[in-house]
Amino acid sequence: MKTVGKVAWVTGMAGVLAACVTINIYFPAAAAERAADRVIDEVWQLRKDAQPPSAGAEKTGETQ
Amino acid sequence: MNRVRGHLEKPSRILAALVFALTTGLAFAQANLDIDTPAIRALTDAMKARHTELTPFYESGAVGQAASGNLVLRDAAQVALPQRGRVNGLIAAENADRAALYREIARANNHPEWEADIRATFAARFIERAPQGWWVEGANGWVRK
Amino acid sequence: MLGIGRIQYPGLVLDDLKIRLSEGSATVDIGALTLGSVSVRGLELRCAVFEWNAEQIRCKRGSLRAPEPLSDARAEFAMSPDGKSGQLTVGLAGGGRLAAELVSDGLTIRINGFDLKFLKPWLPDFAALSPKGTVDCALKVPVNARPIPAELACTLTNGAFSSGDGRQAGEALALDLVASAQPVADGWNWKTQLDWRQGGLYVHPIYVPAPARLAAQGVLAADRIRVENMDIAMAGVGVVRARGDLSLASFAIGDMELAVEAEDLAVFGPRFLAPLLAPALADKLTFEGRAHATATLAMGRLTTVAAELAGVSIGHSGFDFVLGPANGVLSWRDGGSGSVQLDISGGRWQALYFGAFGIAARADTESATVEPVVIPVLDGRLRLEDLAWHREAGGWYGEGRAAIDPIAMPRLSAALGLPVMGGALSAVLPRVRVRPGEIAADGEIVIAIFDGAIAITDLRLIEPFGVGAYARAEMKAQGIDLGMLTDSFDFGSITGRIDARIHRLELANWRPVGFEARVESSPGRYRRRISQRAVQNIGTLGGAGVVNAIQRSVLKYFDSFGYRRIGLSCVLKNGVCRMDGIESGRARPDGGFLIIQGGGIPALDVVGYNRRVDWDELITRLGRVTAVETAPVVE
């Protein structure tokens, strides 16, 4: 029973989370900040060992 | 995004995802914004090329990072007189590219209405990331970092 | 003690004058000295030796206590008791010297080596501009003439000034000024000539280098200067005429009329127009021609502008675009309407020339309408109709209709540097929308070409004038005659017909960066042959060993082969073209995909093995095999 309860709880939370995720039409502030930082790294060349920001490295979570 | 749902049958992974999501302030919930379009690349390339020319003016305080997400000519007196027009042109060109960049990121992510939010985010990051010695516009006016 | 209430000369007033004598020395107090609009209070002159006799009044080894620039200066004077002749010398702060000489017929005042920075306490508003520089002046006032004229000649060397933010500044200035003035009821009538010889001026956002000449006349009243006529001439730039008034207290312009005669826009444009109108493009815009403009200001605010253009061309060096020469008028009124009426004799975008057309538009602060515009392009016409603009938050939005009356492809393709192609291009775009950073068109552009037709729809141009310019469109081609196509590109010969569809075509800087394209044989009965050279070229494109296979076999004895079907698709993304063949999604046992299915005698299958092809590499190869020095069109 314990396991079932846990699974139910997790599933419920996951449902809530999934709902948050899929209905996320609000502005993704954190993602925008990361995008800004990537652009700034590229344009200002602030990091001395800066390699051109590769899309691949950042896009591991690509969703399509 | 849908991936989270796709893993529903594996509670342990969801648990891990949940912990991860909660600890990172739900950052996980947000996919990266796509900034890898040819237009965005062309804009950042143009900005990068211009940056070398602008750097001395950032360092002297002639040009500052404004809270609007633009560059502003704060103290023209720091620029040799015949160059002042040129600096003004550089600022105008950079601001035009920045405006196009904000608009294009919003458009590339299929949310043109995000443009103002993207501008505000970039403004804050430009100010935050500006190296020591540059001038930025804070809540209480211009300050040197 | 001797008290003298007031001594008054035109333009010079001494108030509350007291002289105290004691045993060969004296102290002279001047309550206030007013020269023109400048007033100095609390002057005190101590004369170590003071002589007063029948011949002269004389002060030797005097020292002056006064505000800068006279402070702690040495002063000496001698004067006849009747006050008709005398001399005065005053040492000025910073090493300068003032010498005044009064003789029977007049007064001469010379100032030498005076540093402008010492003007600060007297002219607080002027001081905000931190003036610097050395001034030498001579002022002559003949006493007996009526009315009394004054003549002033000044030279400024190493002059500089700057507002706190550097938006108004001058450096290394050298100028000569000659002025004369005559007192009138309410001030002075003045006339001046200024010869600006060296240095530079910056008045945000415009930088102007020397030289220039200014001639002006007007009236100087207590608190303002009225300029009745001013001419400024600059080499190459032209003449500026102005009349208006300037407040002396704040140096603010009141009402003003301005006329500008721009003789040569090639000089005038980059210096004045580009920084004001399009600073971002300042180093790319080019100007030619002449213009005459007038403007009025009320209380320092621009109220009307009118300009007449004569033979004016404007170009953008980055786009290799030139418009003009144009003649016409532009006008604008503060808070009201503006209008444009231009006859443009033509233009050019790269090698594409267009003919004469007119533009007539009317605008107010919130909206603008443009009369129909018909631009001849080669043998066709581009028509823009019902163009209306309105302003919303974020910029101007426009909507209208556009159409292209057929332009012959042979001329168009030649103008665009493409291989000469037959056919014609036309367009009907019933709804074109323009918004900041975007132009979108409903309708279609049709190119009747190679005996078939290409239709372009859902056209969107994004940031068309910026570095990030890109375009999106859908394309469909039907019944394209491959024989005509391959002949145009010198690819070898393929007879037959194809249909093509390019879905989600994206061009960045006018080069394809993304699409989903599919080309296949059109349905129907027609002759289907492919030449050996075409097969070889297809092989080269795929980078495969097909060619060798042909060369090794008996097939090399044939010039051409029959085929049943051609089918090829390419999905371009991130610089890689993902290819597929006739039966999409299905691979042959050996992993290849069929591009040309052979048929007839002799038959030949063309099979591709490389599904991922680098797009730039493909274009390079295509350029090589078609031996045409342009980006090939791939349909």
Image (cartoon, coloured by chain):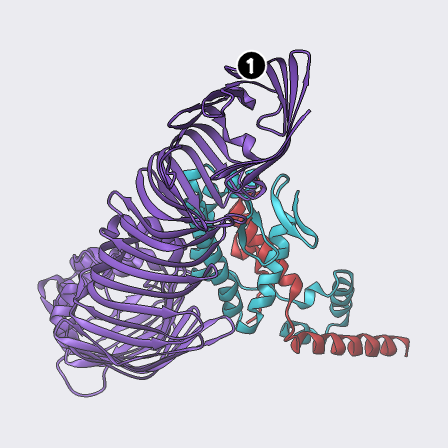
Chain colours: A red, B cyan, C purple
C135 w.r.t. C463: above or below = above
Q: Quadrant of residue C58?
A: top right
Name the residue: 35% across, 61% down.
Answer: C295
Q: Quadrant of the C terminus of chain C?
A: bottom left
Task: Determine the chain carrying the residue at label 1.
Answer: C
Which of C465 and C128 lies nearest the eye of the viewer?
C128
Give x and y (percent) for residue C564.
21, 79
Under tag 1, what secondary structure?
loop
Tell whether C271 sits left or right of B85: left
Tell whether C175 sits left or right of A49: left
**Residue farthest to the bottom, as pictured:** C524
The three-letter code of the residue at mark 1 reads Asn
Give x and y (percent) for residue C12.
51, 36
**Residue farthest to the front, as pictured:** C54
Name the residue: 87% across, 78% down.
Answer: A5
In this rendering, the count of numbered labels is 1
Pointer 1 residue: C53
Name the residue: 49% across, 61% down.
Answer: B99
Give x and y (percent) for residue C457.
33, 80
Give x and y (percent) for residue B87.
45, 45
Which of A43 and C384 lies nearest the eye of the viewer?
C384
